[in-house]
Amino acid sequence: MLTSWRLFPASFTRPKYCPSGFYCRAEDQVSSINERQKKKKKVLIVGSGWAGLGAAHHLCKQGFEVVVLEGGYEFGPKNQSLSPDDVGIRGFWYPYRNIFALVDEIGIKPFTDWTKSAQYSADGLEVQFPVLQNEPQLPAPLGSLLYSKFVRVPLVDQLTLLPLMAAIIDFDYTDSAWTKYDPVTARELLKQFGCSERLYRDILDPLIEVGLYAPAEQCSAAATLAVLYYYVVAHQKHFDLAWCRGRVREQIFEPWMDSLKTQGCKFLRGRKVTDMLVTGETNCISEVVCEKESFVADAVIFAVGVSTLQEIIQNSAALCSREEFLKVLNLASIDLLSVKLQLDRKVNIPNASNVSSGFDNSHAWTFFDLNMIYDEHKEDPVTVLQADFYHATDLLPLKDDRIVSKVMSCLSRCIKDFENATVVDKEIERFPKSLTHFFPGSYKYMMGGSTSFKNLFIAGDWIVNRHGSWSQEKSYVTGLEAANRVVDYLGKGTSAKIIPVEEDEPHIQALRTLNRNVKEIRALFPWSDYFLQ
């Protein structure tokens, strides 16, 4: 069973009669082929999301034997994935340059056009976000502020966001910047820089919860600054987003995996990693154990979410012997509730994607008009929508009927026409501990791409790297980075070319240079590190 992963030389019986020597030469030829196969380096990848497939994508090109373990950590009967990339609906933003280059390479067209979006509160529509690349380009962050159509929040409240630019300039994605801002909550940061209560309550707190999956008082200020800069501040057009025209696994991952299979990549489903075998002399992982099976590998990549890696660590004596892995046990994950509804009539939803603040101090959430986004629902005579609730721990235990009632109540407070609609079909999925929680102080527990094991590497949207991207793009980039580490370690192949994030605009570059110079001058004084930073 699965002996294809262990490459043993084939057994050949020498013929008794060999008058011409033909059979002997054929046997030598086959033996030579087998010797070459034996020398082919083997890489085992745990996880089949953006990170895992990204690593496999490049390593297959370099001639490695690649095996991807997927499944075994199910959120439910329909979700047999080792990756958080299959949960909920997430947009694909303008700066996802590596992902857009990938789908072009594969030859698929999975995305919608750039779409407008809106944000609601308990009072109704709050702001409409246009397609910003269609507007005259202004220096960041002026375009994002001026072109977004705020319905209720006064201009004076909007302007209280500008002082936060000082922190955004100071946060340059270095280790010292993360260390400085990570212990602070996003709410405390906004309070320090004079954000108005109304702007925070109705706009920023819901946006932060949708971007980082938790309320601002539970989010790291460093992660918040990273997200705000990448999506909103860096360039005006970065806030534009498109959507996958169906489920990501069906539209992108499956054709991508089919492409990898043609290059020799093997996918094994339902394998749950339970331990590692370590060669003490070399400090390398020699085998990965999946319950009663084991897989020999020259290099291993873990491309899984936090909660999955924590489970692997807890089951593995080898990983529990290393402090870097024990630190990961301090990290946390967030629950997601995803509700897909079919109504009995057509309800006019002005925008394909929508953010809403929580009602009665509850969760921020998003809802999507699938008639606009998914190809399969474009011709449906009735409305089909999906609502995703983040930080939804107290919602997961509820019965389906109660969840549907709550969702329809929330929708009705955003768009009145929902009051007249009836749910005729539902699909409710619960994803416990499926999203990374970037809580204050979490940075010091996160891993980098390399480990204390020479041949074990890490990828995922939660690890520490310096590319500057976020979410799916970061996952994919870290997968390529892990592949490059394998290439360096095994000394075979060439490194993947990773498209960097777009350079800062000139005025941002100038301000960051000035800020660094001031820091360098201040560091010359003996009391510079006396006060808490």
Image (spheres, rainbow, N blue to C red):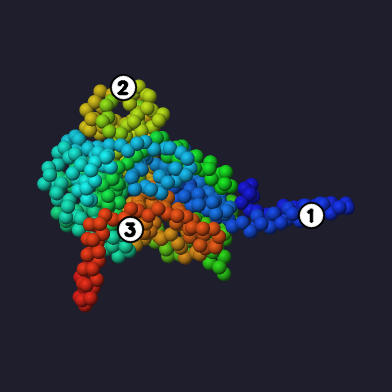
Q: What residue sits right under mark 3 in the picture?
A: 442
Sequence-first tag of 2 and 1: 1
Local secondary structure at mark 3: loop
Sequence-first tag of 2 and 3: 2
x and y percentages locating residue 95 in the rendered image: 34, 48
Name the front one of labels 2 and 1. 1
Q: How crowded is mark 3: few (under 14 residues within 10 Å), some or many (20 or more)?
A: many
x and y percentages locating residue 77 in the rendered image: 47, 38
Judged left or right of residue 425, residue 529 is left
Q: In 3D space, how far apart are the residues under numbered discs 2 and 3 (Cα atoms)?
A: 46 Å
- Look at 13% across and 46% down and name the residue there: 157
Label disc, if present, on residue 345 of the rendered structure: 2
Q: Which of 327 and 45 is in front in this view?
A: 45
x and y percentages locating residue 498 in the rendered image: 42, 54
Please identify the quarter of the rendering in which residue 386 is found: top left
**Relative to 491, does residue 20 appear above or below in the rendering?**
above
Q: In 3D space, how far apart are the residues under numbered discs 3 and 1 (Cα atoms)?
A: 62 Å
Label disc, if present, on residue 372 of the rendered structure: none
Q: What residue sits right under mark 1 in the picture?
A: 25
Name the front one of labels 3 and 1. 1
Observer able to see residue 461: no
